[in-house]
Image (cartoon, rainbow, N blue to C red):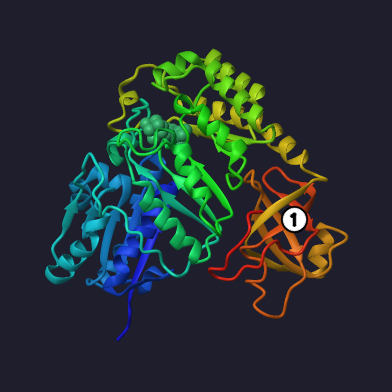
Amino acid sequence: MRSKKLFINTMGCQMNVYDSGQIERRLAPLGFSTTETPNEADIIIVNTCAIRAKAEQKAFSFLGRLTPLKQKNPELIIGVGGCVAQQEGQRILSRMPQVDLVFGTQAIRRLPQTIQKISATRCRVVDVEMETTLSADDFSTSVPDSSEISDFVTIMRGCDNYCTYCVVPHVRGRESSRPPEEIITEIKKMVANGVREVTLLGQNVNSYGRKEGLCRFDQLLEMVNDVEGLERIRFTTSHPKDLSRELMAAFGSLDKLCPHIHLPVQSGSDRVLKRMNRRYTRDRYVENVERLRGVLPDIAITSDIIVGFPGETQEDLEATLDLIRNVEFDGLFAFIYSDRPNAPAVHFDHKIDESEKKARLQAVLSCQEQFTLQKNQALVGSVQKVLVEGFSKTVSGEQAAASRKDLTIGNQWSGRTGTNKIVHFTAAPSTDAPNQRLTGHTVEIMIERAMPHSLWGRPISTPIGTLGKGAQTHAA
Ligand code: 5AD
Ligand code: SF4
């Protein structure tokens, strides 16, 4: 009998990537394995994002393109999950006849029963129920065999911060944290399956465990740091208002914690920050940056900026540009403000014209550009420990010569520095399983060239540690 196939289109943030993994874990016991080809799928799931209007439109246009598939195969089950599903619920079924199932952000654990019910009765289902606390069964810790080198672990869900532009508290519910033991169990299983780096996920990891009286986030990091075989720990996202001294100190004391923090500032203007309900000032943000650099001078700091928030003046924009010049971020994600249903700012006056918002976005991006490049250029001539994530392509002698004179024919690999910068390098191919040879190893790379969004270098050591699936490793 043909095995049943599941195709998932994951949109949006890392939380959705983790949730899609959860969907796979939940449906595997029903006999579903994943496919990259929607045409051969028995179930197609779209895991949607509602953070900006564009993301939502993308979900609906993908769903629209599925109509012919459904017409060809009426047995096909089409499910919509994630934040748009939570936000729109029943409206999706009314608007899209090809959709069988709408399931919200907290309904993943009920998916197996829901899918069985739909298969048996061909009914259409909306499951967008939300709870204020976590249930014991909300996250599956059964980790699949095929693991990436770097993977995500959700440590908490929801958000209680209610930034006025943001849909997250409305579609992901109240903040609640997973018990540390459960998180550690999941990470240990991942490491046994070959994962070398984990990114701990939460909307505001700094308030991890506070509500439930679990341990603090820095204490959780300490526990994760003790997991044998794990090489690197990352986390995202930190809210500047809750950045604790203990967490900053952890950058100095935990050997596996990568020297990088993503600390979204959103605006450099106190007036805008107040209207966004961010609950910190620009000065306090800058103080935090200085403290972090005091603990770890080379820490990479990246951030998010929203331009064109309702009422943002030229003077506010100048304050943001000034902050960017002041802090010198390693990288910046800048977004055009987008009205979201349920988020209070949708009702704020003085909306900014679309073309003006685009111009402001350009101003922010070009202000940051020089700093991103400068930060990369500063690494030329240094040796970086790079965790190799994969093999990208075989470089011919000619291509190699065109890009770098001293290269011989080889394979092109990529990985990341602890500071989260992408590094490409070439290494001679090996005859046995060339794709596997360096993946998962930490290699010392002499950085030779800096591009705006990546670095190029040359390996100067054989891989650190001897890795195999589930093998013990040493922290780099
Ligand atoms: N419009 C534009 N950007 C937004 N973000 C969140 N909500 C909105 C919105 N309504 C941005 C913030 C956040 C990032 C994930 O997305 O900068 O940090
Ligand atoms: Fe949204 Fe603010 Fe919560 Fe982040 S902290 S998810 S921006 S409400």
Q: Residues within 10 Å of mark 1 (few under 14, many from 20)?
A: many
The quadrant where ligand 1 appears is top left
Residue drawn where x is 64% and y is 43% of the image: 419
Please state, as top left, top right, bottom left or bottom right, where the N terminus lies in the image. Answer: bottom left
Observer able to see residue 10: no
From the viewer's perspective, is 357 left or right of 90? right
Of residues 398 and 355, the one nearer the viewer is 398
Of residues 255 and 300, the one nearer the viewer is 255
Instruction: Provide residue 197's location: percent of width, then percent of height.
Output: 55, 54
Helix, strand or loop for disc 1: strand
Image quadrant in which you'd find residue 133: top left
Specify the amino acid type for callout 1: Glu
Of residues 407 and 160, the one nearer the viewer is 160
Residue drawn where x is 45% and y is 48% of the image: 14
Residue beneath disc 1: 444
Observer able to see residue 32: yes
Residue drawn where x is 42% and y is 23% of the image: 278
From the viewer's perspective, is 149 left or right of 421? left
Instruction: Provide residue 66's location: percent of width, then percent of height.
Output: 32, 62
Q: Is residue 97 above or below residue 373?
A: below
From the viewer's perspective, is 349 left or right of 85? right
Image quadrant in which you'd find residue 254: top right
Instruction: Provide residue 395's location: percent of width, then percent of height.
Output: 74, 67
Image quadrant in which you'd find residue 462: bottom right
Residue, far bottom:
1
Q: Is residue 124 above or below residue 120?
A: above
Q: Is residue 46 above or below residue 89?
A: below
From the viewer's perspective, is 260 left or right of 37? right
Q: Is residue 470 above or below residue 169?
A: below
Instruction: Provide residue 98's location: percent of width, then percent of height.
Output: 24, 60
Of residues 387 and 112, the one nearer the viewer is 387
